[in-house]
Amino acid sequence: MTQPDHDVELVNRCLKGDKRAFGALVEKYQKVLFNVALKIVRDADDAADITQTVFVRAYEKLDRYNPKYKFYSWIYRMTVNAALNFAKRHSRLTPLETHTIPSRMNPAEDFAGAELSERLDDAMFTLPPEDRALLSLKYTAELSYRDIAYVFEIPEKTVKSRLYSARQRLKDILMAGGFDEYERA
Amino acid sequence: MNTNALNLIHRELDGENSAEDSRRLQNLLREQPDLQRVFDELSEVDATLKASDAVEPPVWLKRSIMDALPERGSSRSVFAGLKELIGTLWQPVHARPALAYAYTFAIGLAVGLAVFAIALKDAPATEEHLYGTLADRDALARLEPSGRVDIQLPEVAGTAELMSSRDLFTIELLMQSDEPVELRLVPDPALELRGITRTSDSPSDMRVDADAVQVEIEGAQSYTVLFDRVDAGSAGVRLQIYRDGRLLHEELLQGG
């Protein structure tokens, strides 16, 4: 999905003072970073704030970026950290304690993609923020296990086992709410 | 359920099984209907996650990011330039040694002023940031949630989330109104306005005067207002909502 070499070239141009090069990086990554943050904090305004903060921070610290690593892994790490910190700070205001999603009243109702997506989001938000971050990197950012391991600073093996259990938990929550019937309706 | 079998399922979903592992899994699925059911359910969840559409970020986001970028000063080239300048200025001293004291003083003064100017220029980039832009990150990191007020009026609805620390008090307003209404925030004397930032992009009017902050709300708007706590003890801000000059609602937003 990305061309790391091109990213490094853009970073080098930024370091030489070419702001437009940073604009190209923003253009390239803003959507996926916004969506990763959104999956963690849920609120679009908060996700936009986090995305902005991360890009500004990345710009400030660009001279510390090590081109040995992929630019996107570096910026995803900042996004996940910022979004997780935000989620922790706000957890007292929006407790995520519900572990079941209400069943649909009428599973035979017409299938609607938007509703299904909303339902998936509801289920996601019953998971701990770290699991949401993991799933968003896997499915929204489509990162490899290796890149996810770099973002979380944990071994690849741990990423897999945590992802397996997050996926399992999501399945259990959705099935408890009648997801399978809904899906087949 | 057998953990190895579950791992095989997850690995299959991620396309990580070898041909032999895939065959082994297929055999297990044939033999164990329960395992087949789990496989089907996980496949559905996986497919739904993959098919989940990404949301478009707000149209203003890129512009907002680019506007928020600090100026990137190239300190190395500034100092290299200074060194070159000093070298050039020092050349006449070789011809007239009597000028050495005057040159040393003048160059010292110039270098001092240049360093001061660079430090001043760079200061906002490192200090000013409210989630961002209004306070340093350490101060913001010390903020703790201290309350939330829901506002539900026929004319306007939304929330005010309060955060406070020993030094700061912030109010995050997320409001929605079909018709224009005016919000007035009047801090008590224990607070001093640090600044206000609008995080939504709809055009709206913000005014700050000696004793209050006023913002106009139409459509969906979000603001964060930041106050310095100048006195110890509890701090409060009176929220007043007006429409066409008529007071609709008044409430005290009390920080910890």
Image (spheres, coloured by chain):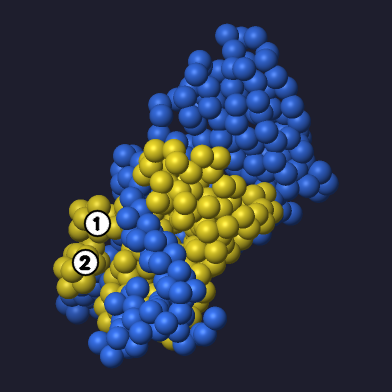
The yellow chain is A
Q: Which residue is mark 2?
A: A2
Q: Residue lying farthest right?
A: B233
Residue located 53% across and 59% down the image: A175
Please give the label number shown on residue B92: none
Q: Position of residue A131 (x, y in %)?
A: 51, 67
Residue A87 in view in this figure:
no
Residue located 77% across and 38% down the image: B254
| Real-space Cα separation, disc 2 to disc 1, in angstroms | 9 Å
Q: Residues within 10 Å of mark 1 (few under 14, many from 20)?
A: some
Picture mark count:
2
Q: Colour of chain B?
A: blue
B161 left or right of B25 in image: right
Q: Mark 1: which secondary structure? A: helix
Q: Residue lying farthest bottom?
A: B20
The amino acid marked with disc number 2 is Thr
| Callouts 2 and 1 close, C-beta under 8 Å | yes
* Up-down relation of residue B28 to residue B105 (above or below): below
